[in-house]
Image (cartoon, rainbow, N blue to C red):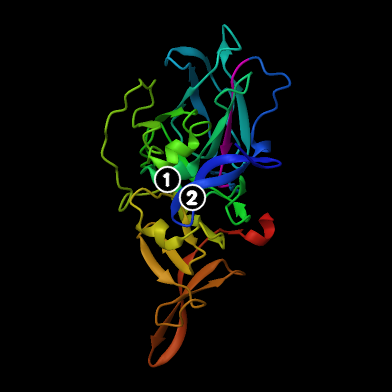
Amino acid sequence: MALALGFVDAIGIFGTVLTTIGFAQSNWPSPSEQKGAVIRVKVGLQNTSDQDYGGRLAKIQGFDTHNSMIGEATPEEDIVSGDFADYTLEQSSGGTQAQYITLVGTNGGMCISWITLKNLDGAFDSAWTGDIGKSCGRSWNFGDQVAGRDPNGNPYKPSCTWIDADHTDNINTGAMKIDFAAYGAQLNDTINNNKTCTKTIYSFDANKIDDVPSQKKRRSNIGRDRAEWMNDIIQISDFPADNATELCLSETSYGTDAIGSDGFYCNMRTRELIPTCKLKQVEGCIEVDEENKVITKNTTVAKRSVKQAYNTYKQMRHFSTSKAT
């Protein structure tokens, strides 16, 4: 259903709940040279270091309304962090409608901000966002890519959901299968009847997924080691959805340290949550030394207030609503 010129309905987080957001139509691939169903995968968390949140999928499979496989695509290149790639299913009949799409991960974590499906005739065209995976207990982190507008008309930037085949980074999803009808034509029914999580099947193993998911317990990432390079980066965001308290307390969040719009600093390795001094002038509050890329903690030594280095980073990555408009 169209919201306004250039936007369509999709499911995303606004505040703390899943609701309808305005998803930009430009996020779908162009149909001009389309020969079958096309899936666009957008990777979040753009990073300029050698190690980032981009990667490659092992396979993408399409299934019709009867859950019979109609075609697949095998990606041959990585998606660069912050970029997207379009994959056309190799179908015997290009006009056969794909409703269910499976994405299978490889041995390297990828954080997906959104996925869109476009059939030749437009059937089931819709979007899946990383906010859905986050809300359904999958490993996630802040996204940094603007996908559309929230209900207040502000830039909407979904979280990204991790997919990884070998789980070396403690990621709990190896493959997933999405019912795109549920996030498009049936979107209102999906939201109103709390079907958002049941309309995507998540598999720990990176294999083809049958139509009935196994009910696996959520794996907690709290206390687990993270990739070494993540220790060198901190994200600083004023986007309303980027809440450091939520990030720190979530059992399934995974990634770099962060300062959120709530004014708190989250050490993702220790899960220590500390207020910034801008929020609260209290013992132990933290300040950001941009020049030296250091987080300092205000402490009292011999009755004198001093700033002690708490964490040092190689990169401080800023995400601002003022730059996204």
**Which percent across, then down, holds residue 259?**
50, 64
Residue 146 seen:
no
Q: Left or right: 270 with respect to 306?
A: left
Give the residue at the far bottom of this rendering: 303
Viewer-nearest residue: 87 or 268: 87
Please say if 76 is above or below 187.
above
Task: Give the main secondary structure of the magenta stretch.
Answer: strand
Does the magenta portion include 169? no
Viewer-nearest residue: 78 or 156: 156
Does the magenta portion include 43? yes
Q: Which is more foreground, mark 1 or mark 2? A: 2
Residue at left offset 68%, top offset 58%: 323
Query: Counting other residues with Cα less than 10 Å from the Cα at mark 2, is it few (<14), some (14-19), or many (20 or more)?
Result: many
For the residues labelled 1 and 2, say whether their Cβ atoms are less than 8 Å apart: yes
| Secondary structure under the numbered disc 2 in the rendered image | strand
Residue at left offset 45%, top offset 88%: 305
Viewer-nearest residue: 108 or 103: 103
Residue at left offset 57%, top offset 40%: 9
Q: Which residues are magenta?
A: 36-45
Please say if 155 is above or below 277.
above
**Which percent across, then down, holds residue 116?**
57, 32
Which is more N-terminal, label 2 or label 1? 2
Q: Which residue is denoted by mark 2 in the rendering?
A: 13
Distance between the alpha carbons at the discs numbered 1 and 2: 9 Å
Name the amino acid type tagged 1: Lys
Q: Left or right: 62 with respect to 226?
A: right
Q: Which residue is denoted by mark 1 in the rendering?
A: 134
Q: Quadrant of residue 164?
A: top left
**Which percent across, then down, holds residue 111?**
50, 41
Q: How many marks?
A: 2
Residue 228 seen:
yes
Q: Quadrant of residue 123?
A: top right
